[in-house]
Image (cartoon, rainbow, N blue to C red):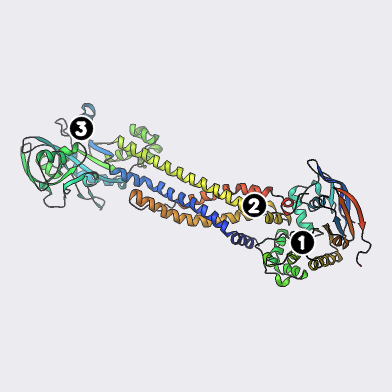
């Protein structure tokens, strides 16, 4: 069953076609990687799927709802309720501790629950670092806090943009292990990356080039 | 969570927030200082202007009519009507009694000096003690009403001194002509009466009074045989600048509607005070020394306008400063705001957080500025008017309201920026 379906989606900035008539689908519980060189339209696709931008034309069906036609206000609600976002630059609120950064996501979703936020940090192996400020955490630790923040509201879809782009190998493996764990629990994952190793961890890879869908590759060795 | 976030921002951006608070404090202090002065200035400026003479003259009705028709002055043989000295205390029983700052009666006579020349002798109060029917007491007289006189020799005539009945003060021009000095004894004759008096002081008034003699009212009444009589009264009163209602009332109070009459009667317009004086002094006509009254009103209005303009300019300056600082703060936090939007914060939630931070900062700035402004008002009061300025209870809510408005207006560009900020643009590239 499709959780996400893009039908003939285009995004045009002036004369530049960032996405050109792209159609893809992602099933519920699937782990998909989106690959492509710089300027291929990966980030544009992520913005559209993450309800942070609208396509110029086409349909974007998330859980059966065409988010391309929704208002900005409604897109905020959908993003809050259904999507967990992870960014390459581990954006965190600099004056809040690790646990508070996780609780911020709860605050805008429903009710902040410190116990639950601490459990999420425990899950990413940072229970002891819960009271530290972002400036006191390493890059890998900050990204793990961002993963905890993304999963705290149990979203249907985790959308990660180059989640390991700024991490060393050890931290990259920790993050990929966390993704594998979330996948096993039934969470749908879309990971935008240019790293073939990260893409290889996914079930399926969608390759973009010059805004067009170049190919889709199913990872036959997935789970091995 | 909201409190943690607000506390976090306030501490994290403390130098910027401190600058915002300082900008607001400066605006609030100027507004507080100026508004306290504006609201208290009426009394101060009035008192200051009172130093330059009376603003109401009371004359007997008949003499007033004659002087209006024939332009005759006091001391003229035509001027035969008088007011009663024992009614003067009633001036402090009128509705606007507290606005009557000082008053003094006058009775003129023609005195012949030792060399045969004539001089105008004016009987008046100097520091006359009055026990009022209300139980209060006060000292009234020319000491207060002619405060600008420069005593070049000797001293003021003191009515509390037992010899006051045998003392005079001489104008500097007359004293020079006669070769008099303080302490000299001179002979005067008024009609058939003669008196030997001591010149206790010589004054320089800078006008025609320099050719006159001033003596205690009792002495002149005795010399002229006009006990308990006075020819005119000068009154110094705190007044409200005239407006259209006051001008209409001055023409004919009876023509006013009962509501207008009540408003006029219960406002310290010079015409209302004159009207009330006529009600208590038998056979009198009280009239405003129009030139003084009008310039008082004009000066007061201009002073107030100047201060209100300074207040408005300082608040506009504060709004511009706040606008720059809040916009800079929001720009610095663009990624954080974009992140909050990305994780589901609605525009109104983020606007609420930003506005709460700014308003808390504004509150701190207002509190500091309010007390600073109080000191500022005292500085103006002491240096300009030589007295302290009372803290008007209306100022705090007015300044709080103005600061809230200025803060909100100053924050509008930043709020617009918050609303326009798209998370996709600040968290990573658009495409």
Badge 3 element: helix
**Residues indicated by labels 3 and 2 sit on the same polypeptide chain:** yes
What x and y, as percent, mark residue B40? 38, 48
Chain ID for label 1? A
Examine the rendered structure and indicate whether residue A30 appears above or below residue A11: below
Q: Distance of mark 1 from mark 2, alpha carbons?
A: 25 Å
Q: Nearer the viewer, residue B108 or B274?
A: B108
The disc at residue B46 is none
* Residue drawn at (79%, 47%) of the image: A54
Between B402 and B153, the one lying in front of the other is B153
Q: Which mark is residue A166?
A: 1
Indicate the chain on which mark 2 is placed. B
Q: Residue at x 46, y 49 (%)?
A: B31
User: Relative to A44, does residue B248 appear above or below in the rendering?
Assistant: above
In the foreground, A31 or B346: A31
Inspect this view and state whether residue B218 appears: yes
What is the CA distance from the residue labelled 3 to the residue labelled 2? 79 Å
Q: Which of the two marks, 3 or 2, is nearer to us in this view?
A: 2
- The residue tagged 2 is B331
Identity of the residue drawn at 54% across and 57% down: B18
Sort mark 3 into few (<14), some (14-19) or many (20+) by Cα contacts within 10 Å: many
Q: Nearer the viewer, mark 1 or mark 2?
A: 1
Tags 3 and 1 in contact by the CB under 8 Å rule? no
Which quadrant is the N terminus of chain A positioned in? bottom right
- State the quadrant of the C terminus of chain A: bottom right
Q: Position of residue B237 (x, y in %)?
A: 30, 43
Mark 1: which secondary structure? loop
**Real-space Cα separation, disc 3 to disc 1, in angstroms:** 103 Å
Callout 2 secondary element:
helix
Q: Is residue B327 left or right of residue A1?
A: left
Disc 3 designates what residue? Answer: B63
The answer to whether the residues at label 1 and label 2 have Cβ atoms under 8 Å apart is no
């Amino acid at each position: 069953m499709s959780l996400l379906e893009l039908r003939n989606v285009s995004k045009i900035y002036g004369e530049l076609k960032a996405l050109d008539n792209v159609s893809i689908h992602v099933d519920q519980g699937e782990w998909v990687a989106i690959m492509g060189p710089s300027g291929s339209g990966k980030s544009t696709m992520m913005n559209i799927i993450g309800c942070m931008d609208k396509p110029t034309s086409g349909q974007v069906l998330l859980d059966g709802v065409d988010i391309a036609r929704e208002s900005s206000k409604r897109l905020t609600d959908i993003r809050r309720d259904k999507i967990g976002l992870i960014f390459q630059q581990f954006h965190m609120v600099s004056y809040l501790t690790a646990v508070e950064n996780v609780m911020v996501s709860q605050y805008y979703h429903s009710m902040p629950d410190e116990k639950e936020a601490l459990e999420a940090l425990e899950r990413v192996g940072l229970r002891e670092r819960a009271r530290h400020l972002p400036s006191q955490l390493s890059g890998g630790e900050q990204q793990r806090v961002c993963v905890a923040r993304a999963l705290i509201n149990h979203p249907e879809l985790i959308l990660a943009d180059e989640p390991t782009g700024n991490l060393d190998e050890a931290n990259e493996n920790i993050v990929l292990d966390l993704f594998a764990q979330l996948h096993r629990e039934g969470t749908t994952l879309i990971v935008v990356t240019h790293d073939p190793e990260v893409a290889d961890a996914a079930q399926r890879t969608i390759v973009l080039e010059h805004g067009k869908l170049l190919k889709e590759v199913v990872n036959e060795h997935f789970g091995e | 969570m909201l409190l943690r976030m607000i506390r976090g921002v306030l501490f994290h951006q403390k130098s910027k927030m401190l600058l915002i608070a300082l900008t607001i404090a400066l605006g609030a202090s100027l507004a507080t200082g100026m508004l306290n002065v504006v609201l208290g200035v009426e009394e101060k400026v009035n008192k200051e202007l009172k130093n330059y003479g009376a603003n109401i003259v009371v004359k007997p009705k008949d003499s007033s009519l004659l002087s209006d028709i024939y332009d005759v002055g006091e001391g003229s043989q035509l001027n035969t009507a008088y007011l009663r000295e024992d009614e003067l205390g009633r001036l402090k029983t009128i509705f606007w009694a507290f606005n009557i700052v000082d008053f003094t009666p006058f009775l003129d006579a023609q005195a012949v000096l030792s060399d045969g020349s004539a001089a105008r002798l004016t009987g008046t109060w100097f520091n006359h003690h009055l026990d009022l029917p209300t139980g209060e007491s006060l000292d009234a007289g020319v000491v207060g009403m002619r405060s600008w006189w420069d005593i070049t020799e000797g001293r003021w005539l003191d009515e509390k001194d037992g010899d006051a009945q045998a003392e005079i003060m001489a104008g500097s021009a007359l004293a020079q002509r006669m070769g008099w000095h303080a302490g000299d004894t001179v002979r005067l004759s008024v009609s058939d009466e003669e008196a030997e008096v001591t010149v206790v002081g010589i004054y320089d008034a800078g006008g025609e009074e320099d050719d006159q003699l001033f003596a205690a009212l009792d002495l002149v009444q005795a010399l002229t045989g006009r006990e308990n009589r006075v020819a005119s009264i000068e009154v110094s009163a705190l007044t409200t600048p005239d407006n259209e209602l006051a001008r209409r009332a001055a023409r004919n109070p009876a023509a006013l509607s009962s509501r207008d009459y009540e408003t006029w009667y219960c406002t310290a317009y010079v015409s209302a005070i004159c009207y009330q004086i006529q009600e208590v002094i038998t056979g009198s006509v009280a009239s405003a020394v129009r030139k003084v009254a009008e310039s008082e009103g004009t000066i007061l209005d201009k002073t107030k306008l100047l201060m209100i303009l300074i207040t408005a300019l300082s608040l506009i300056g504060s709004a511009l400063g706040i606008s720059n600082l809040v916009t800079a703060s929001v720009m610095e936090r663009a990624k954080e705001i974009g992140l909050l939007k990305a994780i589901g914060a609605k525009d109104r939630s983020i606007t609420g957080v930003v506005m709460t931070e700014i308003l808390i900062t504004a509150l701190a700035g207002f509190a500091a500025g309010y007390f600073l402004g109080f000191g500022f008002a005292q500085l103006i009061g002491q240096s300009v008017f030589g007295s302290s300025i009372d803290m008007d209870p209306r100022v705090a809510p007015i300044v709080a309201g103005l600061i809230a408005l200025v803060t909100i207006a100053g924050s509008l560009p930043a709020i617009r920026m918050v609303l326009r900020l798209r998370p996709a643009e600040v968290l990573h590239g658009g495409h």
